[in-house]
Image (tube, rainbow, N blue to C red):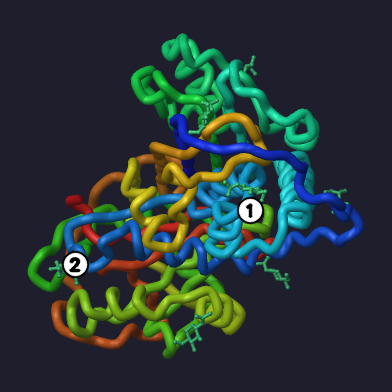
């Protein structure tokens, strides 16, 4: 299982001024928290805004946490109403505690990285400014790991440098994020790149992978490679969500994939209803109320690649972030005498789910059922649309999220 994501926001020229670092009195005594559960609703709302989830012909994959990080970088530089809008949508309370939490998480991920050799999670944030931008010295100091200067009047080199940063962070999974034309009149580029690679704690045997039918709808079905295994997994049922839930842990026991599978009672309706109801509270409740059980797990082997461009800005505007993308943008905490605003965004994501890297041979196929049937408690069979999240248990945070609806998409 691998996934990689990148989000970028490009910036054009606009209006404003003024000065003060984060506050007159940056209170560094507040305790840091590594609990990210408050931001879950940001990711779920964004998912619903970005993905036409009633479509029966498309899949989706992205990293809400990556988008959240890139916007948090903008939040640190914001002021006035731009700051208020970001604060509300990102579910943060103030810059100082947000920065402290950031640093705490950085440390935590770094520690984990060193402890577990079979588990990789890379996350990196960077705000690139044109070398002509007069940054506030205190911001340069506070965000020294995140800020970098580039010469955007040479867009080929600037794009190359950013692509290299993304390539490094995602281990080549996102080889090229930007074209020189994307940055040719940029003054600031906010970048976040994330990479996760995990091996299942309980791996699937390639000899158990067989072709089975996957039902995008009762009428639209295709043979796909389905992995299967019997094991003792955490499993649950959420009536509020209308879904069966299964946890597939990765080695290291910090990160798991949770699969939310609605019954296939009335075709697509189960999936749509589940997504409509989904919110952070219900999701955390559902994940907490699971029990271990002997169960047969059947899931497709798949790979998804996603690119989201300016639809991301449209989605975020519908969620309440407007000023940042307009002439009203107030990014005076970064640079009081510049007229910065965010004019473009690009998010790329990639996921590959497999037994553990090996190709499996195709084998027998059989049609298990066509009619509505409640899921039996002994079998968790993902042969119709489902939602999956890659979830960090310790920080209660959705790192990546996707929907697998149609193998032919
Ligand atoms: C920013 O906008 C103001 C007002 O429109 C203008 O006076 C100023 O020159 C602009 N600053 C830059 C650096 O472009
Ligand atoms: C999905 O929902 C939108 C808006 O409610 C509707 O216009 C569209 O036809 C629906 N698409 C499908 C495939 O049901
Ligand atoms: C931008 O934000 C700063 C700090 O919050 C504020 O002092 C300033 O008045 C704002 N500028 C505008 C034009 O709203
Ligand atoms: C990493 O390992 C050290 C020493 O073995 C341990 O104290 C620490 O809790 C571990 N940290 C994480 C995040 O797993
Ligand atoms: C990418 O990694 C290489 C090798 O570790 C390093 O030399 C280079 O500076 C990195 N580039 C960026 C943009 O991070
Ligand atoms: C998840 O975290 C909770 C406490 O935060 C812990 O009790 C539980 O064992 C963890 N589960 C896994 C699978 O790591
Ligand atoms: C989540 O959904 C439940 C059930 O619909 C609702 O009671 C709850 O208020 C929602 N929570 C939030 C934070 O929206």
Position in image of residue 242 (x %, y %): 37, 84
Position in image of residue 74 (x %, y %): 58, 44
Position in image of residue 291 (x %, y %): 58, 82
The structure residue drawn at horizontal position 41% and vertical position 42%, both measured from the top left corner, is 349
Callout 1 environment at 10 Å: few (<14), some (14 to 19), or many (20+)?
A: some
Rendered view: 303 above or below 274: above
Residue closest to the eye, 98 or 226 = 98
Secondary structure, mark 2, is strand
Position in image of residue 7 (x %, y %): 47, 40
The structure residue drawn at horizontal position 13% and vertical position 63%, both measured from the top left corner, is 221
**Residue 391 in view of the camera:** no
Q: Is mark 1 within 8 Å of ligand 6?
A: no
Tell me if label 1 and label 2 are in contact, CB under 8 Å.
Answer: no
Callout 2 environment at 10 Å: few (<14), some (14 to 19), or many (20+)?
A: many
The structure residue drawn at horizontal position 52% and vertical position 76%, both measured from the top left corner, is 283
Residue annotated with mark 1? 251
**Seen from this angle, which residue lies furthest right?**
29
Residue 17 relative to residue 276: left or right:
right
The structure residue drawn at horizontal position 54% and vertical position 35%, both measured from the top left corner, is 190
């Amino acid at each position: 299982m691998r996934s990689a994501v990148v989000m970028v926001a490009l910036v054009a020229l606009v209006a404003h001024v003024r000065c003060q670092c984060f506050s007159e009195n940056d209170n560094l005594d507040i305790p840091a928290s590594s609990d990210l559960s408050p931001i879950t609703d940001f990711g779920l709302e964004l998912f619903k805004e970005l993905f036409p989830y009633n479509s029966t012909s498309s899949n989706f994959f992205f990293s809400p946490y990556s988008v959240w990080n890139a916007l948090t970088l903008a939040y640190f530089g914001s002021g006035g109403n731009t700051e208020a809008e970001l604060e509300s949508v990102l579910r943060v309370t103030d810059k100082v505690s947000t920065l402290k939490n950031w640093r705490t998480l950085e440390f935590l991920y770094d520690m984990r990285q060193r402890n577990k050799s079979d588990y990789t999670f890379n996350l990196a944030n960077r705000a690139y400014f044109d070398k002509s931008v007069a940054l506030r010295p205190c911001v340069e100091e506070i965000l020294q790991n995140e800020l970098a200067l580039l010469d955007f009047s040479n867009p080929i080199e600037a794009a190359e440098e950013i692509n290299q940063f993304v390539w490094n962070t995602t281990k080549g999974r996102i080889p090229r994020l930007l074209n020189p034309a994307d940055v040719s009149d940029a003054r600031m580029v906010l970048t976040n790149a994330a990479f996760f690679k995990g091996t299942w704690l309980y791996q699937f045997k390639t000899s158990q992978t067989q072709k089975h039918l996957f039902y995008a709808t009762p009428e639209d079905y295709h043979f796909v490679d389905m992995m299967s295994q019997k094991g003792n997994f955490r499993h649950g049922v959420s009536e509020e969500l209308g879904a069966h839930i299964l946890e597939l842990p990765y080695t290291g026991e910090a990160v798991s994939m949770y699969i939310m599978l609605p019954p296939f009672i009335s075709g697509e309706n189960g999936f749509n209803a589940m997504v409509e109801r989904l919110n952070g509270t219900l999701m955390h409740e559902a994940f907490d109320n699971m029990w271990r059980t002997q169960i047969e797990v059947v899931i497709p082997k798949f790979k998804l690649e996603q690119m989201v461009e300016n639809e991301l800005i449209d989605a975020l505007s519908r969620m309440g972030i407007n000023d940042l993308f307009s002439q009203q943008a107030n990014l005076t905490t970064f640079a009081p005498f510049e007229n910065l605003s965010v004019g473009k965004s690009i998010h790329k994501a990639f996921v590959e789910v497999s037994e553990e890297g090996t190709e499996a041979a195709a084998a027998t196929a059989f049609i298990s059922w066509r009619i509505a049937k409640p899921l039996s408690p002994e079998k968790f069979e993902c042969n119709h649309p489902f939602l999956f999240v890659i979830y960090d248990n310790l920080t209660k945070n959705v790192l990546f999220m996707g929907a697998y609806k149609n193998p032919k998409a």
